[in-house]
Image (spheres, rainbow, N blue to C red):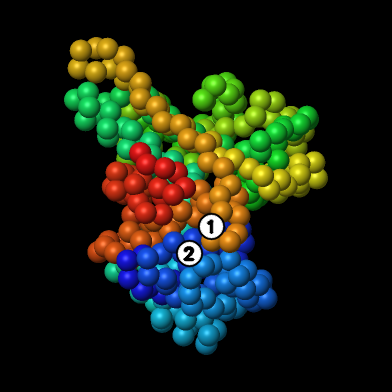
Amino acid sequence: MKKHHTIIIAGAGGIAQAVALILAEWSKVPPTIYIGNRTHSKAQKLVEWIKSGITKSCNIESFLLSEEGLTKEMKEIFKQGEIILDCLPGTLAPKIAGYSKDYNMHYANLTEYIAETQQIIKLAKDATTGFVLQSGLAPGYIDVLANHLFKEFCNDFQVDKVDSLVFKVGALTKNAVAPHYYGFTWSPVGVATEYIKEAEVIRDFKKTRRPSLSERAAIIIDGITYEEDLTSGGAANLPDALSGQVNSLDYKTLRHSGHYAWVQEQINNLGTIDRPIEALQLIMEKQIPHIEDDQIIVYAAVQGKDTHGVLRRNEISKKILPQKVGKHQLRAIQTTTAAPLIQSAQLLLESSFKGIILQSEIDPKEFLNGNFIVPIYGNV
């Protein structure tokens, strides 16, 4: 941040941890940070962890983010805040966005949940502050990267339509063992949700939906073979924004070979039940371990013909590993999710944006080379 800001972080989990640490350590002018959580002791513990890990002075305080509604303390903090960075589960996003609108604050979130995103779009359509939605890794960074590739391709080859735009992310462990070939590096409920809910795609230049896990394929990235398949949420608003310009567009999640066959078997065994996400989550948590040593694989590609009819393909791939920030080591999933959220916050705080800002509406070149993005993802 180029000047002092007062920033509220909703949540005290792993991503909130990374957001607060990076803000405190990497901002040119350290902000005032308020961290709110439904368990005050967890928020306070995070404050102490941040203070023990930064190399510069930063004012950081905790507060109780009550589930029962506004408290006097919350009202006082919201009056001071300039923006809320929502790191809570996606089901709570409309509620936190409502606080932002009511108290004239900017808002940015991470959720891939489509229904909750639509609720916030309606809520904030006449807001006087800016709301950047789905601004994490996927959805988030990967969508801005894909949009950048599309725009660059059209500009370089003087075309306005392309055959395909594909973008993929894998939050993976370095090793994988049978039968599941996976380890949790982030939220189990998030994984279960993206496997069950439908994916939004473009087929024949039109936005449509496909069942998640219905288009499995192998892909080689930097010489390593992965499996890819459709999952929900990662496409953000690109199916709407690029409808009519791209013949085929989709977001897929990358996994180690063998994982998707195991997941599909678990889903098939569920049969017809009322709460499939919760049931799949329970099955996975019983068998799949949580692993700290992670890696993030990012891939995006655009393909089409130039004005001479020559078939062209432009690709970008990246591998991000755990990284030290201040005195603390952060997992790759933490930094890759936190950095786009913070870059979105800077965009809102240092511009005059109002209302909803979706991923296709962000200037790709400026965002992808932002001062919080580059130390994590490198330049584009």
Give the answer, above or below, for where 201 lies relative to 54.
above
For badge 1, the amino acid type reads Val
Residue 35 on image: x %, y %: 54, 72
Q: At 62% from the left edge and 38% from the top edge, which residue is drawn?
A: 172
Q: At 65% from the left edge and 29% from the top edge, which residue is drawn?
A: 256
Residue 297 on image: x %, y %: 53, 36
State which quadrant residue 7 falls in: bottom left
State which quadrant residue 46 falls in: bottom right
Provide the residue designation for mark 2. Answer: 25
Q: How many numbered circles does the render carry?
A: 2
Q: Could you say whether the residue bearing mark 1 is in a helix, strand or loop?
A: strand
For badge 2, the amino acid type reads Glu
* Marks 1/2: CA–CA distance: 7 Å
Most foreground residue, 356 or 344: 344
Relative to 301, 12 lies left or right: right
For label 2, count other residues whose C-alpha is less than 10 Å away and answer few (under 14), some (14-19) or many (20+): many
Q: At 20% from the left edge and 17% from the top edge, which residue is drawn?
A: 307
Give the answer, above or below, for where 371 lies relative to 23.
above
Provide the residue designation for mark 1. Answer: 325
Residue 137 is at least partly visible in this image? yes
Relative to 44, 237 lies left or right: left
- Disc 1 or 2, which lies upstream in sequence? 2
Residue 291 on image: x %, y %: 71, 45
In the rendered image, the quadrant that contains the N terminus is bottom left
Q: Are marks 1 and 2 in contact (CB under 8 Å)?
A: yes
Residue 142 on image: x %, y %: 44, 41
Give the answer, above or below, for where 179 lies relative to 106.
above
Most foreground residue, 128 or 373: 373
